[in-house]
Each structure stands twice: as C-alpha cells, then as structure tokens.
Amino acid sequence: MFRTKRSGLVRRLWRSRAPVEGDGEADRGTHGSGGCCMGKTTKVAKSNAGTEAELKALTHSILKKIKEKQLEVLLQAVESKGGARSPCLLLPGKVDAKVGQQSYSLPMLLYKVFRWPDLRHSSELKRLSCCESYGKINPELVCCNPHHMSRLCELESPPPPYSRYPMDYLKPPDSPDSGPSSSDTGGTTYSAPVGLSDSLALQESGDRAHWCVVAYWEEKTRVGRLYSVQEPSLDIFYDLPQGNGFCLGQLCSDNKSQLVQMVRAKIGYGIQLTREPDGVWVYNRSCYPIFIKSATLDNPDSRTLLVHKVFPGFSIKAFDYDKAGSLQRPNDHEFTQQPRTGFTVQISFVKGWGQCYTRQFISSCPCWLEVIFNTR
C-alpha cells in the first residue's frame, strides 16, 4: 500500500507519545509524566482500550491536518525530548478536541499526548523563554510545541518531613561543626557550604556585569572555575545534543567515586536557569529529579529551610526578587553570615539531602550546584 510522508510522520509521532502508568518507561519515572515539587505524585491510570483507541484516532486526525514542515518540527522536539532546538509550532489555539466526556484545546491535547498525560488545566503550565511567542499574545495562533512548555511546581501543600532542613545545620564556615573544606582551587580555598556561601565567590569572578555565578561541586570538592552568567538564560548540562552554556561534561574531575560517576552520567540535559522580571526560574530538563534549597522558597517566619524536589519537566521560581528584599533583616541568621555575597540557591542532581536523608549536608551529595546571585 502506498504511504505518504505525512502518514509516516504521524505514526512516528504516535509511537513517541508520553507513557502513562502501566507502561515500563512511566513506571521507571524517567521522564516525569506526573508529579509535583513537594513529592506528591499524581498517578495516571492506564487508559482502557476504548479510550486509548479514541485518543489515537483523534490524535491521528488532528496531526494529518498539520503541514508536513510543522510535523517535522514537532517530531524533532518530541524524539529529542527537548534536547534539539526546535522552532515554535504555531497552530490555531481555539480548536477544541474531545476525548470521552472531556474537551481540550489543541495545545492542551498535544501537551497531554506528548508530555504529561495527567495534565488537567493550562494554569499548570509555564511557557519557557526559548519559545519565540514568549510574552506575546496572538489570539489566532499559539505555540503548540510541547517542549516549549514546562509544568509549574505546586508549593501550596505542606512539605513532607524529609524536606525539612533545620536552621541548626547552618553553621558559619569557620564553625567547628561546619562541613569540611574543599581542595584549593586557583588560589581560593572554598569551604563546602552548609547553607552558606563563601564571601569571596563574587570577587573571584571579577565581572560586575554578571547577574549570577555558578559553582559545580562533586561532594566536598569544587570542580572547575566559577561560571559567570551575563545572558538571561543558561543551560547547565552534562550531555545535550545542541548544548550551549555550562557543560559539566567538559570539566576535568579526579573523583573516582562510583556514586559520583553514576549521578554525573544521569545529569543528561541538566537544568535551565532563566532570569525573568519576577525572579530566577529553574527548569528541570533532565530525566531525574533535582533538589533545590532557596530562602525565597520558604515561609519568611519559618525557622527551617526546605529542600524542594523538582521532577523532570517541571519549573520552579528558585529566587524571588521581592521576597529576597524582605528577607534582608538584621536578625536573619542566614544573611548576617554573608553580608557581601547576598543570596544563593543550591541544587543537587538526582540525590536529595536533609534531616531524613543519610546526607545531612549538600556537601555530601554526589553532584550539585551553587548559584550565587549578584544583588548589587
């Protein structure tokens, strides 16, 4: 039977749809089809045969109406899982599709099929800065590229016990109980921070135009130089097909730990840091969770700092400018210890830390980042 190029693209796209619970890949949780930042997982029941057939027929019908060039764009984004740069997929946003008793807009249907089967409402989404239609309003056409979107973390629910990080653990670097120091790096002895950051970090970067600097650590040792960031968005990754940013895979590390090497290999597409008007957002592009600690994610009256778990495909506002200003109070233990460096965010790949983990300090995590903001 003669088969057109369009039908071939449609079949490849359907085979690349996001797995639901009951599929092997979904069970392994490697691509984050559900979940939220506080560890509360949203389960998606595997579709029954009737619903699956209906969804397949509807998806095929819609995709066959899309131009071949647009199908190729969608296929590139889906098969690379966002690793390859792909342009916007501009389609009519007011076209509705119905699956069972539920109606979805065209963008929502594509997001559900190719990213998040448990997606319920567009309010759960955040458009990424890589999208050309970012910040623009076009009533006729909207970007339907699933990898130009991310899921928003839900922070309203109470944190689980494991994420509590007592303020008692925040010792000054010269405290007898503080974390051990790293090896000497480029003339600066940089103490592994236990909730605090070295006051010389910004001075070492020597660049006042940057809005942050990034340090990469493996356990208690900093690897490579500080990375100064001037661009609004930065990709931090180990292996990205079209990577442009801070490539951790190019750094020379002498760490022979099997755990470090295993976690390093899982960093993959890593994260994306984006500076926006309301703060700095972190998007988890990897296939595994990341863990974040930031003072602006906490209740200002709390005496504990929380470690937040961010699943693959999710975004979180890791640094809030307004909250940061209100936190600079004379009695704040966290900030009186670092009057010159301002604020930091700590991010661990794959492995968490805190009160109910075996790792009490982030300096015990295999691979992690410290993002130091220039607040001047």
Image (cartoon, rainbow, N blue to C red):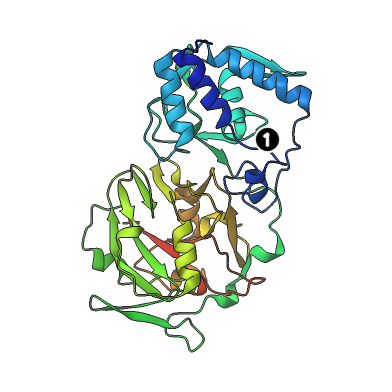
Decide: is 105 above or below 179. Answer: above
Q: Give the x, y percent position of residue 359.
A: 58, 74
What amino acid does circle 1 point to?
A: Asp
Considering depth in this image, is 100 or 179 the residue closer to the camera?
A: 100
The local secondary structure at tag 1 comes to loop
Q: Name the residue furthest front.
A: 1
In the picture, residue 223 is in which quadrant?
A: bottom left
Considering depth in this image, is 163 or 90 the residue closer to the camera?
A: 90
Considering depth in this image, is 214 or 166 the residue closer to the camera?
A: 214
Q: Give the x, y percent position of residue 205.
A: 24, 63
Q: Give the x, y percent position of residue 117.
A: 65, 33
Decide: is 179 above or below 266. Answer: below
Q: Mark 1: give few (<14), some (14-19) or many (20+) Cα within 10 Å.
A: some
Position of 125 with respect to 193 (left or right) is right
Decide: is 63 above or below 111. Answer: above
Position of 315 with respect to 157 (left or right) is left
In the picture, residue 313 is in which quadrant?
A: top right
Identify the image quadrant of the N terminus. top right
* Number of on-image labels: 1
Residue under the image location 52 percent in, 26 percent down:
12
Is residue 35 something one can see in this rendering?
Answer: no
Decide: is 6 above or below 362. Answer: above
For disc 1, the marked residue is 118
Considering depth in this image, is 205 or 226 the residue closer to the camera?
A: 226
Q: Give the x, y percent position of residue 228.
A: 28, 57
Identify the image quadrant of the C terminus. bottom left
Is residue 313 something one can see in this rendering?
Answer: yes
Q: Name the residue furthest left.
A: 206
Residue under the image location 56 percent in, 76 percent down:
169
